[in-house]
Image (spheres, rainbow, N blue to C red):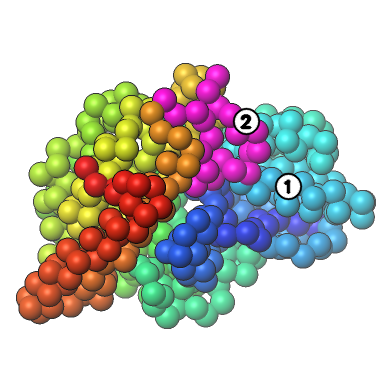
Amino acid sequence: MRVVLADLEGAEGFVHKDTVVGGYGARLRPISGVTTVASVLRRRLNDVPSITMGYLAAILAQSGHEVAFTRGAVLDGDVALVLSSLVDHRRETAWADSVRRRGMRVGFVGLAATKLPDLFLDHADFLVSGEPEEAVQRLAGGEEMRGIVHSGEIADLDTLPRPRWDLLGALRPRSAWGAWTRPLGGLPVLASRSCPEFCTYCPHRILSTYRARSVGSILEELEMLCRLRPEPFVIFRDPLFSHDRERCLELAQAIAARGLGLRFECETRLDRLDDGVLEALRRAGCVNITFGVESLSPEALRRVGRRPIPEDHQGHVIETCDRLGIRSVAFYVLGLPTDTWESVAATIDFSIRLGSTLAQYKLLTVYPGTPLWKQLRASVHERDWERFDGFTPTFTHPNLSAQELQFLLAAAWSRFYLRPSFFAKMWRLDSRWAHRLARRLDGAVSGLHARQEEALMSRAVTC
């Protein structure tokens, strides 16, 4: 059997699916000059291959099937498996229609197909509901699938074959450093699945339960990547990489002891990091850490089920990252239900003072299947699922208009990135006089931002 795996490339802005937003995907829409530049850079530098497709390719090849992969071209085969998303579902279903007209059977996989099957059912012969590996194992074994096919969790993740990056064309020589934080050609690894936290707005935990792979299994995969590509750059896609401190230390120490020579990035919570963990991660090759800060307001965070982290600990972790040479990327969510203009402005100001290398800002999006969806569904006014992208207001906010929310979002990106201190830190200028000069110029740039904001909205983004 010839199986076509389709992870279709988005056409507008920068679309990233797979494990992003739990699998619903995200689209960086150019809503300002800064986000336009960010969108172009991410399309060129951050288009990471799909870990889901890598696993499915391995399962199918292990059973002796021929595997083809496409980002958009229509290929011939017996069955096509399409990675679904919310943010690009029309492109995905149009592609499915075109290959079905050629006589190919089509199935959709992923969180979007699982939680919103009606978007895809008319364009497919079957949908895989749940994590797809168990169902695809059955497909590889000869089962003919129709309608909604339920796929059980793989209880022991160590039993899955290693992703076949060669079958996805992901091993082309691309190793030069990019303009942001990661080199081209990074390869994703999942050391665990789902998330043990209880944030009501996050889709990461609504597809399956939290499970972690053994350290030995992860090391075997890392050694495989080192054989496939010298000194690979590894992107751990776990939402909470250092959840288990001792397991994280064991993995980091083993990577260093084996001298694998890789570099990597990971995502976690700041309260799951301390000096000992950071030092061990750096020795193992960690160069980037991403984490959610979300909001300055502890009360706003508690209202959406997120445990606040003391400001002094957040600052200390970033200072430690700076000392060790680890770049930090902080995520922020603007427009939480209790937010006001002043509280969003305070979060933006805090994001600059906190001093991470990079920052990413999105609007609160009410995603189907999350606890927040049940709470706020009546206030959701957006009917186009492709606009559930993190850059479009999707519900009627009690304190802020849609225009104000998008203005604050654009202002956050501009205030963080259009300041001399950002470039001084990004380019790692070590001299004290350069940092003093940059901070002095920041004040003048902040005043310019304020005047532009007042001209557009009659008020500045200040708390």
Residue 42 visible, this angle: no
Q: Main secondary structure of the magenta part?
A: loop
Instruction: Give the magenta part as a residue range.
Output: 378-398
Q: Is residue 141 above or below residue 121?
A: below
Q: Is residue 26 left or right of residue 6?
A: left
Is 37 covered by the magenta stretch?
A: no
Q: Residue at x 29, y 49 (%)?
A: 460
* Mark 1 residue type: Arg
Percent coordinates x, y for residue 11 in the rendering: 66, 61
Quadrant in the picture for the C terminus: top left
Q: Is residue 204 left or right of residue 75?
A: left
Q: Is residue 143 above or below residue 70?
A: above
Q: Residue at x 83, y 36 (%)?
A: 122
Q: Nearer the viewer, mark 2 or mark 1?
A: 1
Q: Nearer the viewer, residue 88 or 127?
A: 88
Q: Quadrant of residue 141?
A: top right
* Mark 2 residue type: Lys
Q: Which mark is residue 90?
A: 1
Q: Which mark is residue 115?
A: 2
Determine the CA span between mark 2 and mark 1. Answer: 16 Å
Q: Quadrant of residue 353?
A: bottom left
Mark 1 surroundings: few (<14), some (14-19) or many (≥20) residues within 10 A? some
Percent coordinates x, y for residue 419 in the rendering: 26, 67
Is 379 covered by the magenta stretch?
A: yes
Residue 323 visible, this angle: yes
Q: Which mark is residue 329?
A: none
Label 2: element kind? helix
Choose the circle earlier in sequence order: 2 or 1. Answer: 1
Percent coordinates x, y for residue 248 in the rendering: 26, 48
Label 1: element kind? helix
Q: Is residue 68 above or below residue 241?
A: below
Percent coordinates x, y for residue 200 in the rendering: 41, 27
